[in-house]
Amino acid sequence: MKLSDFDIDFNKFKNEKDSFKFQLKDTFFELKDNSLFDQGEVEVIVQCEKFENTLVLDYSLNGHINSLCERCLNDIKIKVNSVRQDVLKLTLNDDLLKEENYLSINHPIFSVYDPIYEQICLDMPTRIICKNSITQYECKINHPNAHKNNAVDERWSELKKLIEK
């Protein structure tokens, strides 16, 4: 998988509407430098509709991301299920081309990689813990120091008597 796999060339549209399907695997996350996630399986369907000077992209994401629980470090799967819509304007104005939602009329190619990655990140819960996973289990943490030996040193007990007086 490479970044150019996510480029949509609107000049090659057969109709006014077209759809693209992407199966995202671990290689999708490897394309991003310092990606927040490493593993997952997400199916993405992008419905594109072309108007005179406007392009409408409707994204539908469904799948899961593999991660570690922030509390107990168990492997968990976080569900990804969302929709998103982007509206792009076609223009010849060079100043507008610097803006985010504008494409050149002469070269209308748009990469859907970043919007898909952003939507996956937005779908993640604030806390990546077992409770927010697909299984919704509670974290079970067994601390090795939780069962301390509470042997009382007699010297301290004598000092505590002084405090009480």
Image (spheres, grey):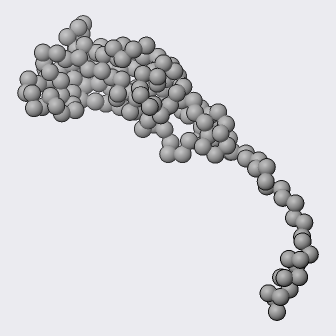
Q: Nearer the viewer, residue 116 or 136?
A: 116
Tally of numbered tags: 0
Of the 4 image quadrants, the one containing the C terminus is bottom right
Q: Where residue 109 appears, x then y in whole percent?
A: 23, 17
Q: Quadrant of residue 48?
A: top left
In this view, the residue in front, 88 or 161, is 161
As drawn, the residue found furthest toward the front would be 155
Q: Position of residue 126 (x, y in %)?
A: 50, 45
| Quadrant of res 67 | top right
User: Can residue 15 be seen here?
Assistant: no
- 33 or 4, nearer to the observer: 33
Residue 28 % position (x, y): 45, 21
Q: Give the image quarter of residue 132.
A: top right
The residue located at (14%, 21%) in the rendering is 104
Q: Position of residue 164 (x, y in %)?
A: 81, 88
State which quarter of the image contains the N terminus.
top left
The residue lying at 83 percent from left, 82 percent from top is: 160
Q: Residue at x 11, y 25 (%)?
A: 91
Residue furthest toward the left?
A: 93
| Residue for point 45% across, 31% down | 35
Kindly tell me whether residue 67 is visible in this rendering. yes
**Relative side of 53 to 27, left or right:** left
Height in image: 48 above or below 126?
A: above
